[in-house]
Protein backbone atom coordinates (compact mmCIF):
# COMPACT_ATOMS: atom_id res chain seq x y z
CA UNK A 1 0.00 0.00 0.00
CA UNK A 2 1.25 3.48 -0.89
CA UNK A 3 1.76 5.84 2.05
CA UNK A 4 0.01 9.20 2.27
CA UNK A 5 3.10 11.31 1.56
CA UNK A 6 3.78 9.38 -1.67
CA UNK A 7 0.14 9.74 -2.77
CA UNK A 8 0.25 13.49 -2.21
CA UNK A 9 3.67 13.84 -3.90
CA UNK A 10 2.33 12.19 -7.06
CA UNK A 11 -0.70 14.49 -7.08
CA UNK A 12 1.56 17.53 -6.59
CA UNK A 13 3.67 16.42 -9.58
CA UNK A 14 0.46 15.91 -11.59
CA UNK A 15 -0.82 19.41 -10.76
CA UNK A 16 2.57 20.94 -11.61
CA UNK A 17 2.77 19.12 -14.96
CA UNK A 18 -0.78 20.18 -15.88
CA UNK A 19 -0.19 23.76 -14.77
CA UNK A 20 3.12 23.98 -16.65
CA UNK A 21 1.68 22.24 -19.75
CA UNK A 22 4.55 19.76 -19.33
CA UNK A 23 3.43 16.90 -21.59
CA UNK A 24 6.49 14.72 -20.94
CA UNK A 25 6.20 15.21 -17.18
CA UNK A 26 2.47 14.51 -17.33
CA UNK A 27 2.86 11.30 -19.35
CA UNK A 28 5.69 10.08 -17.10
CA UNK A 29 3.30 10.05 -14.13
CA UNK A 30 1.13 7.30 -15.63
CA UNK A 31 1.83 3.58 -15.70
CA UNK A 32 1.99 1.92 -19.12
CA UNK A 33 -1.31 0.15 -18.45
CA UNK A 34 -3.05 3.15 -16.85
CA UNK A 35 -6.81 3.30 -17.21
CA UNK A 36 -8.34 6.78 -17.30
CA UNK A 37 -12.04 6.68 -16.51
CA UNK A 38 -14.00 9.85 -17.15
CA UNK A 39 -16.55 9.92 -15.46
CA UNK A 40 -17.25 6.21 -14.61
CA UNK A 41 -15.96 5.24 -11.12
CA UNK A 42 -13.92 2.11 -10.35
CA UNK A 43 -13.08 0.79 -6.89
CA UNK A 44 -9.31 0.52 -6.36
CA UNK A 45 -6.81 0.64 -3.50
CA UNK A 46 -4.33 3.48 -2.92
CA UNK A 47 -6.61 6.28 -4.04
CA UNK A 48 -6.66 10.00 -3.40
CA UNK A 49 -9.02 12.75 -4.61
CA UNK A 50 -8.12 16.29 -5.66
CA UNK A 51 -10.82 18.97 -5.80
CA UNK A 52 -10.07 21.80 -8.20
CA UNK A 53 -11.29 24.85 -10.08
CA UNK A 54 -9.75 25.31 -13.50
CA UNK A 55 -9.84 28.11 -16.04
CA UNK A 56 -9.29 27.61 -19.74
CA UNK A 57 -9.86 29.02 -23.20
CA UNK A 58 -11.52 26.47 -25.48
CA UNK A 59 -11.39 29.01 -28.30
CA UNK A 60 -9.95 32.51 -28.83
CA UNK A 61 -11.90 35.19 -26.98
CA UNK A 62 -13.69 32.73 -24.68
CA UNK A 63 -12.55 31.95 -21.15
CA UNK A 64 -14.45 29.46 -19.01
CA UNK A 65 -14.12 28.07 -15.52
CA UNK A 66 -15.29 24.78 -14.01
CA UNK A 67 -15.04 22.82 -10.78
CA UNK A 68 -14.13 19.17 -10.68
CA UNK A 69 -12.73 16.26 -8.75
CA UNK A 70 -9.98 13.93 -9.98
CA UNK A 71 -9.61 10.57 -8.23
CA UNK A 72 -6.19 8.99 -8.61
CA UNK A 73 -5.05 5.41 -8.06
CA UNK A 74 -1.32 5.30 -7.35
CA UNK A 75 0.93 2.27 -7.96
CA UNK A 76 4.70 2.26 -7.55
CA UNK A 77 4.84 6.06 -7.34
CA UNK A 78 2.94 6.62 -10.60
CA UNK A 79 -0.68 7.15 -11.61
CA UNK A 80 -2.28 3.82 -12.47
CA UNK A 81 -5.81 5.20 -13.00
CA UNK A 82 -7.48 8.59 -13.12
CA UNK A 83 -11.20 9.29 -12.78
CA UNK A 84 -12.32 12.83 -13.61
CA UNK A 85 -15.66 14.14 -12.40
CA UNK A 86 -17.12 17.45 -13.57
CA UNK A 87 -20.49 18.65 -14.73
CA UNK A 88 -20.60 20.43 -18.11
CA UNK A 89 -23.81 22.18 -17.05
CA UNK A 90 -21.86 24.10 -14.38
CA UNK A 91 -19.16 25.54 -16.67
CA UNK A 92 -19.02 29.29 -16.12
CA UNK A 93 -18.17 31.82 -18.85
CA UNK A 94 -15.91 34.41 -17.23
CA UNK A 95 -14.79 36.31 -20.34
CA UNK A 96 -16.32 36.40 -23.83
CA UNK A 97 -19.54 34.84 -24.95
CA UNK A 98 -20.78 31.31 -25.21
CA UNK A 99 -20.31 29.68 -28.62
Image (cartoon, rainbow, N blue to C red):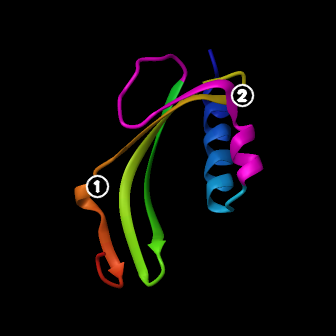
Density class for disc 1 (Cα within 10 Å; few <14, some 14-19, many ≥20) is few
Between the residue at mark 1 and the residue at mark 2, the CA separation in whole angstroms equals 31 Å
**Residue 18 occupies quadrant:** bottom right
Residue 79, position as x, y percentages in the image: 63, 31
Tell me what residue is drawn at x 25 percent, y 60 percent: 90
Magenta residue span: 23-46
Residue 98, position as x, y percentages in the image: 29, 76
| In front of the other: 47 or 35 | 35
| In front of the other: 1 or 68 | 68
| In front of the other: 53 or 60 | 60
Q: How many marks?
A: 2
Q: Earlier in the sequence, mark 1 or mark 2?
A: 2
Q: Secondary structure at mark 1?
A: helix
Q: Residue furthest front?
A: 99
Tell me the number on the disc at residue 8: none
Q: Which residue is mark 1?
A: 88
Tell me what residue is drawn at x 71 percent, y 52 percent: 23
Q: Quadrant of the N terminus?
A: top right
Residue 63's place in the image compared with 91, above or below, is: below
Q: Which residue is mark 2?
A: 77
Density class for disc 2 (Cα within 10 Å; few <14, some 14-19, many ≥20) is some
Taking the image as shown, residue 97 lies to the left or right of residue 52, namely left
Q: Is residue 59 magenta?
A: no
Residue 84's place in the image compared with 75, above or below, is: below
Tell me what residue is drawn at x 36 percent, y 36 percent: 39
Q: Residue furthest left?
A: 89
Taking the image as shown, residue 38 lies to the left or right of residue 98, namely right
Would you say the residues marked 1 and 2 are in contact, meaning their CB atoms lie under 8 Å apart?
A: no
Tell me what residue is drawn at x 72 percent, y 21 percent: 76
Residue 84, position as x, y percentages in the image: 43, 41
Amino acid sequence: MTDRSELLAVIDRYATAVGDLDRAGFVALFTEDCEVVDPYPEVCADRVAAVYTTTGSPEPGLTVQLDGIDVFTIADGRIAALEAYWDPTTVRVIDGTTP
